[in-house]
Amino acid sequence: MARGGKSLFSLTTVFASFFGAALIAGAFAYYNYTFSKFKFIDFKEFVFYKSSDIFKPDKQRYIVVFFSSKEPHASEKIAKLALKNPILAIDYYNTKIQSVENVTFLRSGTKTALKFIQRFNIYDEPVVFVIKRVRNTLYKQDSMIRKFDTLDAMTKEKMEDL
């Protein structure tokens, strides 16, 4: 049907195209936003302890493993992970575990543990993600958080890109 010599179909097509483009642009922007909102951690605010002293980061990148020491042989399984970056293994139950060459076992107070869990939106364990130094003691999350069913699932092949 025509009005004044023009078709309504062409006007509708223009608006539909504009709406479709806006929808795609919005989805793309949201996708980029969700991946750019990685979290920061400042080790001056988040105090973690090694066996007997306060942990002070000194490497450019760390692989963070949040795990439960109540899982049988958890610390041994993590200690066997030979990855190209050093590992910070944070125990949910704050058990005092002796660190090994490439793995630093950390524990913290309840307040710090809760802030850490909330900051990185950790809903299960074990999880793994990478943090990268921004400056001094400030680190930024540098990967998505990966959830594994068990520590046995954390094989070198599944974590080789970390």
Image (cartoon, grey):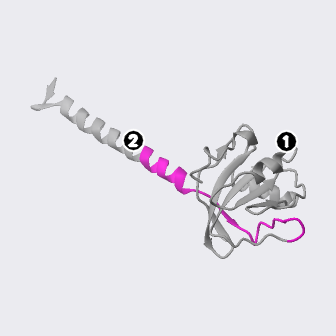
Viewer can see residue 98: yes
Q: Is residue 35 magenta?
A: yes
Asked if residue 118 is positioned above or below residue 150 in the image, the reply reads below
> Which residue does the image show at 64% across and 45% down from the upper left?
146
> Which residue does the image show at 25% across and 33% down from the upper left?
12
Viewer can see residue 124: no
Identify residue for label 2: 23
Density class for disc 1 (Cα within 10 Å; few <14, some 14-19, many ≥20) is: few
Query: Which is closer to the viewer, label 2 or label 1?
Result: 1
Marks 2 and 1, the one that precedes in the sequence? 2
Which residue is more in the foreground, 15 or 59?
59
Amino acid at pointer 2: Leu
Q: Is residue 128 magenta?
A: no
The boundaries of the magenta stretch are 27-53
Amino acid at pointer 1: Glu
| Position of residue 74 measured from the top left corner of the image (x, y, whole percent) | 82, 46
> Which residue does the image show at 53% across and 52% down from the upper left?
35
Density class for disc 2 (Cα within 10 Å; few <14, some 14-19, many ≥20) is: few
State the quadrant of the N terminus: top left
Q: Residue furthest left?
A: 5
State the quadrant of the C terminus: bottom right
> Which residue does the image show at 74% across and 69% down from the upper left?
43
The quadrant in which residue 112 appears is bottom right
Residue contact at pointers 2 and 1, CB within 8 angstroms: no
| Position of residue 62 measured from the top left corner of the image (x, y, whole percent) | 66, 62
Q: Which mark is residue 71?
A: 1
**Element at badge 2?**
helix
The quadrant in which residue 8 appears is top left
Which residue is more in the foreground, 85 or 142?
85
